Every structure is written in structure tokens, then in C-alpha cells.
């Protein structure tokens, strides 16, 4: 990074890229397009190259602009982290803590999120909490973009720049509903189950699907609730977390299919952006989740 570049220019640059243009970034920056253009010209003068092009083809970063953006996000993330750390040392624990989790975790006894949040809120009453439900990809992207502070979930693919701390393993079973033809069948064969219409998750790759014994899926969902609905329709089979499906099993609405062949476990982890582990609020939430997890029933 060229010495002497104003961090304000970097923040304007990041906002322009986030909104894909000068006009769309006006509201966030509270600047006119003319002012934004002036600041961007100053940034390009400071770094010595063109960072973006705009015209009839729309907004686009140059190759060097792409590299500058990556470094800009890293630097701004470290600056924000440093500011939060110094505030915590002074006892100024205000602001917002943004937590991201996968859906259906509310029924998971291994993840005492509600209890941890309760203790955290009483310990840090000045902090505003923002709890978001996201997919694994969105959780990781949110951490990398500093839109999230901490996340808990299952991450089939790891992202550079993040630190993953294992918490526990979540049991997944393959289910069919009482409306499905195989619900009353006995002596099912794995080869026959593998040919049934299965629901997959949007963040699963073909490799992940094959790992669970299926060549293709006939339906895709974004959430476990959507997956449950499709399974209950009787037209599909699919995977669900054991804790989430348990009440439906007890009602006689769902049945586990060939657990020894199709059951598997997902490794849940607590994830932070690299370099942020020293921040007091994040340390506190991490310790609460890790301590609560050890005391929960598995």
C-alpha cells in the first residue's frame, strides 16, 4: 500500500464497489456523485493507477483495482478490529455484535445459543445484538466482509482469512414421511433408497451429494424448514438434523431410513475473522458457547 493514503479514500472505495457505482453509494456515504468522483480520482492519483471504469457497460474494477480491493478490505478490517479492541480496553463496550448461525439451531441441545446470549446481554448491557440466520456460504462471506462478527455453523468448504474452532458434531439422518411409499416398507435396500427422489441443500456440491449416496437431487432448498416441508409432502426423502426432526418422529410423521448406511455427522464450528480473537465481546461469546456446549446433553 502506498504510504500516506487517507483511510477515508479507502472506505469510499470499498463503499463504491459494494454498491457497484458512484450513484448507488451516495446514500451510504452522504456524498454527491461529484464528490465521490473527486475522492476516487484522488485515490487513483495516490496509488498511481486506474482502479475502476464506468460507462455504458456499467461499473467494473480493473485488474489492479481487484487486487487493491482485496487489500483494502483486509486493512479496513484490521483497523476496525483495532478500534474495537481499544474501546474494549477502555471499557466502552457499546456498538453492535452481529452473530450469524444456521437455521434450526434453536432445537439443538448442543448449541446453547439462547442461554449464551442471555448471559452475554446481562454482562454487556450496552451492546446491541443482531442475530442473523444465514447459509454456510453467507456466514463466511459476512465474516470476511465484516458484516458479521462471529458465526456458528457447518462449513463444508473453509475460507482463507477465517479461524475455525470446533464445537460439536450434529447428527443427520435420512428421513421419509408417513405419506411416502417406503414408510411402511421393511427390508429396504440402500441401492433402492439411492434411486429415490431426494432433496438437497443449495450449498451442497455434487461431490457432497455423492458422498451421501445420491447421484442427483430433484429438489433444492435454502433452509431446513423448506426441506422438512418437502419431506412431509411424501414426494421426497431428505436429510434433517436429529434434534430438529425428533418431534415429528415422535408424532409418527417421519421415519429414519437405513441409519447405518445413510447417517452422518456434521462438524459445527465457531468462526471468527483472523485477527479478531482478542476483542473482549468476541472472547466472551466464544467462551459462553464453548462452556455451555460442554455442559449440554448430547
Image: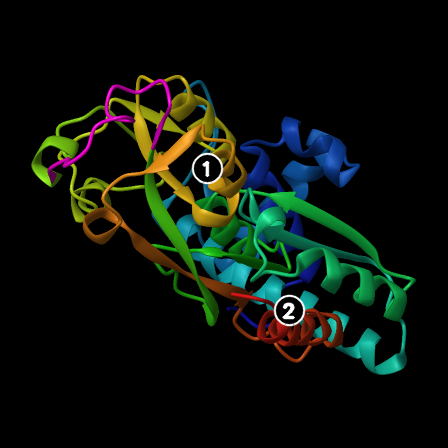
Q: Position of residue 94 (x, y in %)?
A: 87, 63
Residue 260: in magenta span: no
Please report contact status of discs 1 and 2: CB closer than 8 Å, yes or no: no
Which of label 1 and label 2 is nearer to you?
1
Horizontal placement of 31 versus 48: left or right? Answer: right
Task: Identify the mark nearer the N-term, 1 or 2.
Answer: 1
Between 200 and 97, the one lying in front of the other is 200
Q: Is residue 50 visible?
A: no
Between 114 and 298, the one lying in front of the other is 298
What mark, if any, has residue 273 been given in the picture? Answer: none
Q: Residue at x 28, y 51 (%)?
A: 263
Q: Position of residue 64 (x, y in %)?
A: 38, 52
SS under mark 1 = helix
Q: Is residue 33 visible?
A: yes
Q: Residue at x 43, y 49 (%)?
A: 65
Between 121 and 13, the one lying in front of the other is 121
SS under mark 2 = helix
Q: Which residues are the magenta region?
A: 176-189
Horizontal placement of 253 versus 208: left or right? Answer: right
What mark, if any, has residue 249 been given in the picture? Answer: 1
Q: Give residue 277's quadrant in the image.
A: bottom right
Q: Give residue 77's quadrant in the image.
A: bottom right
* Residue 293 versus residue 59 in the image, above or below: below
Characterize the local packing of mark 2: few (<14), some (14-19) or many (20 or more) Cα atoms within 10 angstroms: many
Horizontal placement of 209 versus 76: left or right? Answer: left
Inter-mark Cα distance, 1 to 2: 28 Å
Q: Residue at x 56, y 62 (%)?
A: 110
Mark 2 — residue? Answer: 289
Residue 183: in magenta span: yes
Amino acid at each position: 500500500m502506498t504510504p500516506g493514503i487517507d483511510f477515508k479514500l479507502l472506505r469510499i472505495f470499498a463503499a463504491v464497489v459494494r454498491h457497484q457505482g458512484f450513484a448507488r453509494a451516495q446514500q451510504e456515504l452522504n456524498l454527491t456523485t461529484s464528490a465521490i468522483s473527486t475522492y476516487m480520482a484522488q485515490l487513483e492519483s495516490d496509488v498511481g493507477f486506474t482502479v475502476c471504469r464506468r460507462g455504458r457497460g456499467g461499473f467494473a474494477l480493473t485488474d489492479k483495482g481487484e487486487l487493491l480491493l482485496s487489500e483494502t478490505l483486509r486493512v479496513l478490517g484490521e483497523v476496525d478490529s483495532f478500534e474495537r479492541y481499544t474501546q474494549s480496553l477502555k471499557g466502552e463496550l457499546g456498538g453492535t455484535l452481529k452473530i450469524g448461525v444456521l437455521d434450526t439451531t434453536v432445537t439443538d441441545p448442543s448449541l446453547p445459543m439462547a442461554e449464551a446470549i442471555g448471559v452475554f446481554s446481562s454482562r454487556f448491557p450496552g451492546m446491541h445484538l443482531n442475530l442473523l440466520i444465514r447459509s454456510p456460504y453467507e456466514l463466511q462471506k459476512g465474516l470476511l466482509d465484516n458484516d458479521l462478527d462471529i458465526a456458528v455453523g457447518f462449513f463444508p468448504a473453509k475460507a482463507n482469512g477465517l479461524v475455525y474452532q470446533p464445537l460439536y458434531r450434529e447428527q443427520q439422518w435420512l428421513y421419509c414421511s408417513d405419506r411416502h411409499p417406503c414408510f411402511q416398507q421393511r427390508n429396504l435396500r440402500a441401492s433402492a433408497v439411492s434411486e429415490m427422489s431426494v432433496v438437497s441443500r443449495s450449498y451442497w456440491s455434487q461431490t457432497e451429494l455423492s458422498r451421501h449416496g445420491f447421484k442427483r437431487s430433484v429438489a433444492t432448498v435454502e433452509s431446513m424448514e423448506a426441506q422438512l416441508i418437502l419431506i412431509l409432502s411424501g414426494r421426497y426423502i431428505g436429510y434433517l438434523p436429529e434434534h430438529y426432526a425428533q418431534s415429528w418422529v415422535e408424532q409418527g410423521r417421519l421415519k429414519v431410513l437405513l441409519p447405518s448406511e445413510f447417517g452422518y455427522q456434521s462438524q459445527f464450528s465457531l468462526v471468527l475473522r483472523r485477527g479478531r480473537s482478542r476483542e473482549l465481546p468476541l472472547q466472551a461469546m466464544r467462551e459462553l458457547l464453548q462452556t455451555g456446549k460442554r455442559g449440554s446433553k448430547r
